[in-house]
Amino acid sequence: MMDYATLLQVLDTTLRLATPLLLACLAGLYSERAGIFDIGLEGKMLAAAMAAGAAAALTGSAWAGLLAGIGASLVFAALHGVASITFRGNQLISGVALNFLSSGITVLVAQALFRQGGRTPPLTGNARFNPITLPGAEALRDIPVIGPLYYEVISGHSILVYMAFSIVPLTWWVLFRTRFGLRLRAVGENPAAVDTAGVSVVALRFAAVGITGILCGLAGAYMATALQAGFGREMTAGRGYIALAALIFAKWRPVAAMWACLLFGFFQALALRPDVVQAVVQVKVPVPFLDALPYILTVLVLAGFVGKAIPPRAGGEPYVKER
Amino acid sequence: MDALAKNMGRRATAAPFSIELKGISKAFGPVQANKDINFAVPKGTIHGIIGENGAGKSTLMSILYGFYKADSGQIFVNGQLTTIPDSQSAIRAGIGMVFQHFKLVQNFTVLENIILGAEDGALLNTSLSKARRVLRELAQEYELDVDPDALVEDLSVGHQQRVEILKALYRQADILILDEPTGVLTPDEADHLFRILKGLKDQGKTVILITHKLREIMEATDNVSVMRRGTMVATVKTAETSPEALAELMVGRKVLLEVDKGTPNPGKVVLSVENLRVRDEHGVERLKGISLEIRAGEILGIAGVAGNGQSELLAALGGMMWATGRVTLNGAELPLSGAGSDGQSRRAAGIAHVPEDRHHHGLILDFSAWENMAFGYHNAPQYQKNALFMDNDALIADTEHKMAEYDVRPPIPSLAAKSFSGGNQQKIVVAREMERNPDLLLIGQPTRGVDIGAIEFIHKQIIALRDAGKAILLVSVELDEIMSLSDRIAVMFDGQIMGLRDPATTNERELGLLMAGVAGSSSGAAA
């Protein structure tokens, strides 16, 4: 069996690993709710990670890195927007193309800048987002059960982790309580309704894609300047796709997206501790199986075993005014 | 010059017109959709616009609603020269539009749909409570009852249409344009709609009604304008014209509105259906035990509001959907599921099928006319050159022949199906299916989106096939069509047949009640 301390360690890792998934998942949520499918979350995260790692290394400031990461991700988001909104191209092809572009260009630029085999130099001190100890964590540490939970799991993460989780209620509020959210959801369901109501479909969709860019920028910057210390080739390792899977698993709802990302983050945390898994289930579980679990669950959702996942109805279709 | 300007100025300020168009022209590439349109709608009237498909009605209304920009010409709204570059400007000018295909968000509530684009402020709360209040007032004023918290996807089509009208009124539209509003309604719902429109008119609002149904024009409008090939050919007072005169203006020649058909001469039973049941992919039963018979030389018309199982009936008989029950054709039982229940086998058995939705099931729009002419019959021996190749030359020659016979214009076999007008597309499908000399013809919505000239032609073909001793199952949501073509009428509601009537002795009122699910006392023919 797993003792309490080990459980807390695993949960702590879960939070850290769920954060980039959550940011990317919320990024995808804005875009897809507006009717623009984005398979390019991965590429945007990767570009942001490289830009953040490079800028942090050059300036010594994690915040400069964050800004650079968001900027890089926004450039990719803008390309996706121009291709799929302005020129009404195929959104999947645009996303895949941007992923390839990102995969190559990140290593190329990092190599040109630092000549360290496509990596950015290791980051230290203020070039990274360092853990924050939440108020009262030290004082409460000795209270049984709750104290260690607060100290080990909740406290002691970088600012970006707390930002990511506070964006969840914010997103819910924006989507369901504001004019912008109403229009965003409408444009993903029936853009003609938005257009005939006198609201610009193009502007709304670009706004959504822009938010996607910012959130992917946060996710990538977190990877390079908080979770790890610098950018490395293909460091996002498919997290963009897992985030998409989480988005489907959560049926495009923000709070459910958080739980899905925590679940998938938990699987990733377990994959790092095969010894713990073996101790609990008494069987040796291959690590690749744990890695594959998010996808297996998503396939089950898509097959309709865990309720029906209905994507936004206008998703993936460029809007053309009809006569 | 001065006097003229003064005169013009006075006329403009005193103009009793809600909408006045002067010299509006619009071209799409080489196609002149609107040519020098002059047209005025007096305030507080219901004005009909009638014309065939492609006559330019929708283009003209799209210009009024800011979807297109006219190449030239002027728009006056309430006497003021107005430019309408987008829908927002149209709404600001007091113009509201109810499109043929509703522009509603299906999984939003009625209230959310109403406020979309007309919210007060960045937060929704105030807008929603204001809309709830306004909606209650409008409901009382105009018989526009609808549950504000219902999801639109749960509403009937008639109620969805009310939401569209409410949307326009919520935006304080003074001028309401309705594009083909009754196509999806029962006769009762249509009557209700016309009552609402009259109520709007009494409140001083102006209504523009676009339709291809002459009867509605005669019933509901004060004035009517007729469009033909992009031009406005006439504007007349409705009271001073007749359906025949309007039809002639629309088509440019005399048209036979009544179908000319002799008495039927029914022979032996060709199709017999017993207890036919169909479930859709969600497990919902769409056909709840249909039984019917069609004899040789007889047209059985199925009336009903769209979505009451007519499509599933055609699909099950045509081999597009699995079913249970017993169906025999000339005494031989047809498999209803599994092997032998596909469209190919049905055609081999002697059932031809003109599907309801010609764009999805009748044609492949990007393929040429001659390729479309072969679908379903592409394995026919006369089209094979040898074991490997089809005989395209034979197919093209065959297509040319059929195009001449069915008056398909332009008669070019290599032209893509999408390049033909709706009427000519339908003629391609009808030619393909009828020319096989089937024992049974299934034909769904034969004249949907088809112009009057082609309607006349297709109706004649259907009757000719009947007189040649074939059995015909006709499904249409156009009650006029059902009443004029059918030898017997079956009314469907909620997957069941509500009753059988003789077109000679029944009337629209009785059929309308059956279509709404009200079982009436039997009259006329029995099965």
Image (spheres, rainbow, N blue to C red):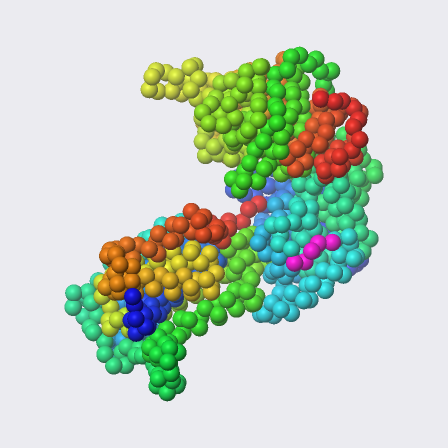
Q: Is residue A287 above or below residue B443?
A: below
Q: Is residue B128 above or below residue B354?
A: below
Pinpoint residue B239: horizontal percent, then vertical percent: 83, 39
Q: Depth check: A316 or B68 in front?
A: A316
Residue A159 seen by the camera: no
Whether residue A39 sits left or right of residue B189 in the image: it is left
Whether residue A35 sits left or right of residue A137 in the image: it is right
Task: Count the labels in the image.
Answer: 0
Q: Is residue B135 above or below residue B472?
A: below
Q: Residue at x 65, y 24 (%)?
A: B292
Q: Depth check: B123 or B390 in front?
A: B123
Q: Is residue B27 above or below residue B350?
A: below
Q: Quadrant of residue A231?
A: bottom left
Pinpoint residue A241: horizontal percent, then vertical percent: 34, 57
Give the dominant element type of the magenta stretch: helix, strand or loop.
loop
Magenta highlight on residue A311: no
Pinpoint residue B43: horizontal percent, then vertical percent: 78, 53
Q: Residue at x 54, y 32 (%)?
A: B358
Pinpoint residue A292: horizontal percent, then vertical percent: 30, 54
Quadrant the N terminus of chain A occupies: bottom left
Residue range of the region highlighted in magenta in the rendering: B145-149
Magenta highlight on residue B147: yes
Residue A36 seen by the camera: yes
Q: Depth check: A237 or B42 in front?
A: A237
Q: Quadrant of residue B431?
A: top right
Q: Residue at x 38, y 53 (%)?
A: A297
Q: Residue at x 64, y 67 (%)?
A: B127
Quadrant the C terminus of chain A occupies: top right
Q: Depth check: B36 or A255 in front?
A: A255
